[in-house]
Amino acid sequence: MAIHLYGLILGRNAPRVRGRIAGIGGAEVTVLAAEPLVALVSAHAASPSRASLDDVRAHDDVLRLVVDMGITVAASRFGQRFPDEAVLRRHLADSADRIAAVLTSFDGAVEMRLLLPAGSDLLPPRAAEQVPEDAGPGRAYLETLRSRVAAPPVSLRAALGPAVLSERVEYLAKSRGVAFAHLVQRENVPGYLEAVGSLPALSDARVVGPLPLYSFAEPTGD
Amino acid sequence: MTKPPAPRDEPGALDEIYDPEQLVLSDLINRVLDKGVVISAHVMISLADIDLVQLDLRLLISSVNTLNERGKAAERGDPPVRPDSRP
């Protein structure tokens, strides 16, 4: 028996979670009350030692479905599985106040991610990463960490206007580009998309969202 | 043995880098594996042979990598790294 944790919502929003949600491997996603939070979880016969890309997609799909129900969700980092509900509740008890404070502060907000491919005029030139094409995921991850340390500051917040409440900038692995994580109130998403579309410099950008809070799930300090 | 990067004029070399779907997939993996709330770092599973606990403990994975490099250097007979040498 293993309990997979997808994300957390405020207890008061739990009644808005409706219908059957299929999670990893088709397992039904259920809500687990742990006041003041509710955890989105699914039960599995055993905790696998490995996960697949399909599992990663399923984790994200579940959270996006809940976001589409109008609920603000703090995403759980993929890979957290617990032997039973009691252990999960015990771990949650240690973090509940911190997570509830974030969810209360950002209630009604979603995360929008704007992806700029490498080579965009908006991005300052950077030294090429020396990552072999067949580098394993561990090496690629380390190069990503190095890129973040060496990354020159770049921001779109001023260009996109007041719809962006907060911003995080992350360089993607293998120099594929840059991801801008933007915290946006749900009702301001159309205005955000309009602002993105009005900037010619962002013509090659991809926007992904609305998403659960990934980059803003922990206290931001903003 | 490490395969050299594909030459720029080789078909597919730039396509792979600028493929929007690759960009979206790269971001998906980045955010799902590296973002979000962590309530326990002791119950992680692995993805593609990487223990996510190690991914979270960045110093550890760096140390493992460094140890591997030094092990290969020792096999090649390279001189040991001096304390005052720089990376």
Image (cartoon, coloured by chain):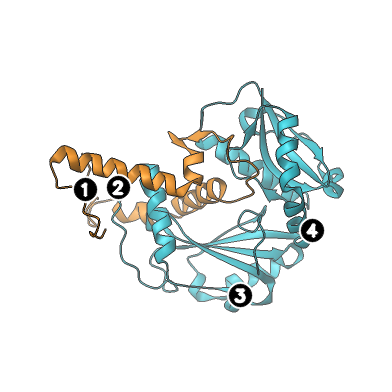
Chain bearing tag 4 is A
**Residue ID for mark 3:** A160
Q: State the image coordinates of residue B87 (x, y, percent, origin top left).
A: 26, 58
Q: Nearer the viewer, mark 4 or mark 1?
A: 4
Do the residues under discs 3 and 2 have CB atoms within 8 angstroms?
A: no
Q: Nearer the viewer, mark 1 or mark 3?
A: 1
At a point 68% along the width and 70% down the height, the residue shown is A165
**Residue B76 position by quadrant:** top left
Q: Is residue B67 visible?
A: yes
Do the residues under discs 1 and 3 have CB atoms within 8 angstroms?
A: no
**Residue ID for mark 1:** B4
Q: CA distance from mark 1 to mark 2?
A: 7 Å
Q: Is residue A47 above or below residue A8?
A: above
Give whichever of discs 4 and 3 has the lower sequence position.
4
**Residue ID for mark 4:** A104
- Asked if badges 3 and 2 are on one and the same chain, I answer yes
Q: CA distance from mark 4 to mark 2?
A: 44 Å
Do the residues under discs 4 and 3 have CB atoms within 8 angstroms?
A: no
Q: At numbered mark 4, what does the secondary structure look like: helix, strand or loop?
A: helix
Give whichever of discs 3 and 2 has the lower sequence position.
2
Q: Nearer the viewer, residue A65 or A86?
A: A86
Colour of chain A, in one word, is cyan
At a point 73% along the width and 58% down the height, the residue shown is A102
- Asked if badges 1 and 2 are on one and the same chain, I answer no
Q: Is residue A135 visible?
A: no
Q: CA distance from mark 4 to mark 1?
A: 50 Å
**Residue ID for mark 2:** A133
Work out which quarter of the rendered image holds the N terminus of chain B and state it: top left
At a point 23% along the width and 52% down the height, the residue shown is B10
